[in-house]
Image (tube, coloured by chain):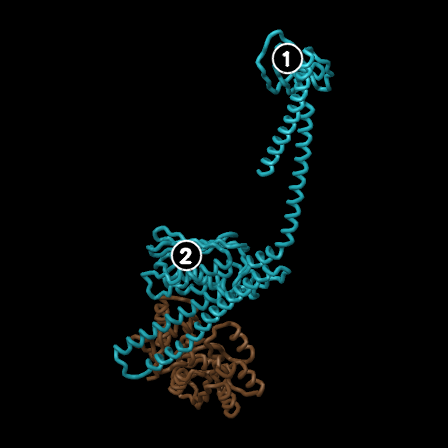
Chain colours: A cyan, B brown
Amino acid sequence: MVMIAGAALLYLTIKKVIYKQVDDSLRTEKAIIADQLKQTDSIPDFEATFGHQIGVKLLNYHVINYQSIKDTDIYDAVSDSFIPFRYIYAKGNTVEKKGYVITIYQAINEKNELLKDISLYLFFLFSSLLLISILINYLISKNLWKPFYDSVRIAGRFNIQSDKPLDLPETDIVEFNQLNEVFDSMTRKMRDDYLNLKEFSENASHEIQTPLAVIQSKTDLLMQQKGLNRESINLVRSINEATARLYKLNQGLLLISKIENQVFHEKKKISLKQIVETGLNNYREITQLKNIKVEMEADNDAYTEMNEVLAEVLISNLLSNAVRFNIDGGFIKCHIDNKFLTLTNTGSPITTKPEDLFRRFHKNSENPQSVGLGLSIVKKITDSYGMIITYNYHDTIHELKLMYHQ
Amino acid sequence: MFYTGDVKLLIVEDDRSLSRSINDYLRLEGHICEIALTYNDATQKASVNKYDCIILDIGLPDGNGLDLIREMKANKLTGGILILSAKSSLDDKLVGLKIGADDYLTKPFHFAELSARLNSIFRRNNFLGLNEITFNEIRINTEDNQVYVNDKLLVLTKKEYDLLLFFMANRNRIITKESIVEHLWGDNVILTDSFDFVYTHVKNLRKKIVAAEGRNYIKCIYGFGYKFNEN
């Protein structure tokens, strides 16, 4: 913008200067001719300088003094084009009170060309200056800011769960070093906090096990005592149930925290067909007792890369749901192709929104015994492998669809 | 217990309350028990006395239980080792079993399960030279997993056989349905109506024994579960 405005201003200034010069020379010439006219009362001899056309006319009457300078185009037969001229038109009177008219034309096409040349030249000069300055600026900033961009790139890749701290490279620039130090200490603190928290939740889960074992052992002993009345038996049984729940809860949370801490990082090729078949086998007794019909349809080459333990937990949790919430005489259908694992089963209608099912501690009102971690563990596992799991139901038919990566 | 003669056990567990509970329970079963609360205490006791089995907690205040196993094996001390751990991590379990422990039990546990595991260790280590359990008219050969009632072969499913052994290891004790579920299916199978299956299996086992003219030993105990009653 500035460049364009500057160029325009420059063009106008140069044009003005040229015009002023032309006008001045026209005026001077006119003044000389007028002077001669006054002195001699006759048309003076004059040589038409190049590009000048002078016309002088003497009149027999008195005229009012007048002078104007204007632009005009005159047809030139040689070049078959109109050529721009500047001309002066002046009227005046001699000593003997006779009027005269002077017109002097001066071609300004050369001047215009000069103007054009100067403009063009200046334009190129400015453009190249601009380009060079941009280039220099770019090169300088590239080198100067390189450590900065390096730091930004490294910091952008920072993962709190990674086992390495953020190590930003040393630079020659003091300010960047300061910035890197702040970055380093900040992320170090974040990592420390995270590791502490991680350690705490794992430790807490482990430490809870021993008191739980104490409670369990005491109720076991209490149970063996003779002469317990009905009331005491019910109390002991309640304690037992609560302990079992607490244990399951703790196990579930421990598992989730282990998945989050990527304890199960070893991967191998898992045959989905095989793992589902094993899972179904574990539940066969129950499905038989509940008269649940089990159907399985699977591609033999349906494989996915994941941790074996997590794959087992995933499938076991899904099947457990399909079995637990099934109805007597219902069915479980499992279909595996090279993209989806679909589990369809009968069951009583549910009232909750499908997306709520995967939330931690979501509980089915019909089943107060459940801890409410099963499907959130499923979600944790599928999330950690970038799989997508969706839940749909229609009346009594429930469908879980797992999109996995081959 | 179905072993005559005294079984001597060492309980290595730093939690006083828990070690006393284990002690109390195993004494009820007729075992002789000693308690070690620290690693040092345990090494001393193990080097002086001969134990048939050591119940060992891995996380001790002054040492790692796994080192005690290594020390025992280095000193060629005999006797079974049952690891008791709060850590359900697979690594500890694998290492423990690899360096010579016989079994691994995660806290919290049912005493009925502890009894069953101990019995299985005694059997595997051929303690007292027994691979046959005899109880009145019932005889179980643990080598080829056969059960005889009045010398007639009893055909049992795998689960019924496991259940009978579980009862045998916990005679005259109340066993809860929860502990039976965990023993038969493990705690990976989360089942709300699993008690129905316990009931079915117990019913079938009882029916089969009675059909072979055995006595009905399995009593239902209100609120808790079952009891295999000698009387």
Label 2 lies in what chain? A
- Tell which tag, 1 or 2, sits nearer the viewer: 1
Are the residues under badges 1 and 2 in a single subunit? yes
Q: Is residue A116 above or below residue A58?
A: below
In the image shown, does A23 or A186 lie closer to the viewer?
Answer: A23
Chain of the residue where label 1 is placed in the rendered structure: A
Local SS, label 1: loop
At 42% from the left and 63% from the top, the residue drawn is A284
In the drawing, does residue A303 fall left or right of residue B170? right
Residue B113, by quadrant, is bottom left
Q: Is residue B135 something that shows in the picture?
A: no
Q: Residue furthest top?
A: A60
The amino acid beneath tag 1 is Val
* Occupied quadrant, residue A104: top right
Disc 2 marks which residue? A332
| Left or right of A58 in this view: B203 | left
The residue to which callout 1 is attached is: A95
Label placed on residue A146:
none
Percent coordinates x, y for residue B136 in the rendering: 38, 84
The x and y percentages for residue A9 are 60, 33
Question: Residue B44 vs residue A146: left or right?
Answer: left
- The residue sitting at the bottom extreme is B48
